[in-house]
Amino acid sequence: GAGVSQSPRYKVAKRGQDVALRCDPISGHVSLFWYQQALGQGPEFLTYFQNEAQLDKSGLPSDRFFAERPEGSVSTLKIQRTQQEDSAVYLCASSSRRGGYEQYFGPGTRLTVT
Amino acid sequence: GQNIDQPTEMTATEGAIVQINCTYQTSGFNGLFWYQQHAGEAPTFLSYNVLDGLEEKGRFSSFLSRSKGYSYLLLKELQMKDSASYLCAVGDSNYQLIWGAGTKLIIKP
């Protein structure tokens, strides 16, 4: 596709449920980033992949958060045993460069934990 | 520590000019970015400054002073569609973008 896509766009989960959020980056983009964005705030870095290698996961808030990109294209962010504080928009971005400051964002997944 | 400050909200009139300021303190610097984000949508790239001075791109211009840790985004001939949040971000010494909280710009007719 022409841009970064994410699915689902909206997800409501009951506290304690596991969720999986998908990101399809722009084809051929080397770098992929996951961010968490709370209402009225800027994006907060979660993790970074260069191809299939997860080079930085320092932003993941707890061990309930796990991300993978096994073939260097599609990525999945999984949150186990969701809690209310996990409610946020999860943004995925990709870049054609290693590192890749010029990032193209997907529309995000709005997660609401009830 | 890492810190990026920008005003929370600004209001301007259609057809006018507005300047959104951003100050930063980061451990590294590999350029300053401005992104536009409409409500409920993803951020979209507007501009990138790595050297001091003004970069002009149509109705939007961005300025950087590295010695002062300061940037601004200048929007001219404001249109209603410019109502959005404007996010300032700094590239750190590795590859991360450090983001400000964003400035919500409200355009009034």
Image: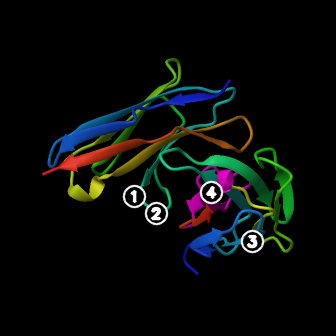
Question: Residues in magenta?
Answer: A84-106
Does residue B9 lie above or below A36 as drawn? above
Q: Is residue A95 left or right of residue B61?
A: right
Does residue B23 lie above or below A59 as drawn? above
Foreground: B4 or A25? Answer: B4
Q: Say which residue appears at 43% left-offset and 55% top-offset.
A: B37
Residues at marks 3 and 2 touching, judged by CB atoms closer than 8 Å: no
Q: Position of residue A105 (x, y in %)?
A: 57, 62
Mark 1 and mark 4: span between their CA atoms?
Answer: 20 Å
Does residue B21 lie above or below A103 as drawn? above
**Foreground: disc 4 or disc 3:** 4
**Mark 3: amino acid:** Ala
| Residue highlighted by disc 3 | A20
Q: Is residue B13 visible?
A: yes
Mark 4 and mark 2: span between their CA atoms?
Answer: 17 Å
Q: Is residue B18 left or right of residue A75?
A: left
Q: Say which residue appears at 84% left-offset and 74% top-offset.
A: A71
Chain designation of label 2: B
Residues at marks 1 and 2 touching, judged by CB atoms closer than 8 Å: yes
Secondary structure under badge 1?
loop
Q: Residue furthest bottom?
A: A1
Q: Which mark, residue B94? A: none
Chain designation of label 4: A
Q: Say which residue appears at 79% left-offset and 58% top-offset.
A: A49
Residue A61: say if magenta.
no
| Residue highlighted by disc 2 | B41
Secondary structure under badge 3?
strand
Quarter of the picture holding the C terminus of chain A: bottom right
Q: Which mark, residue B38? A: 1
**Mark 4: amino acid:** Ser
Chain designation of label 1: B
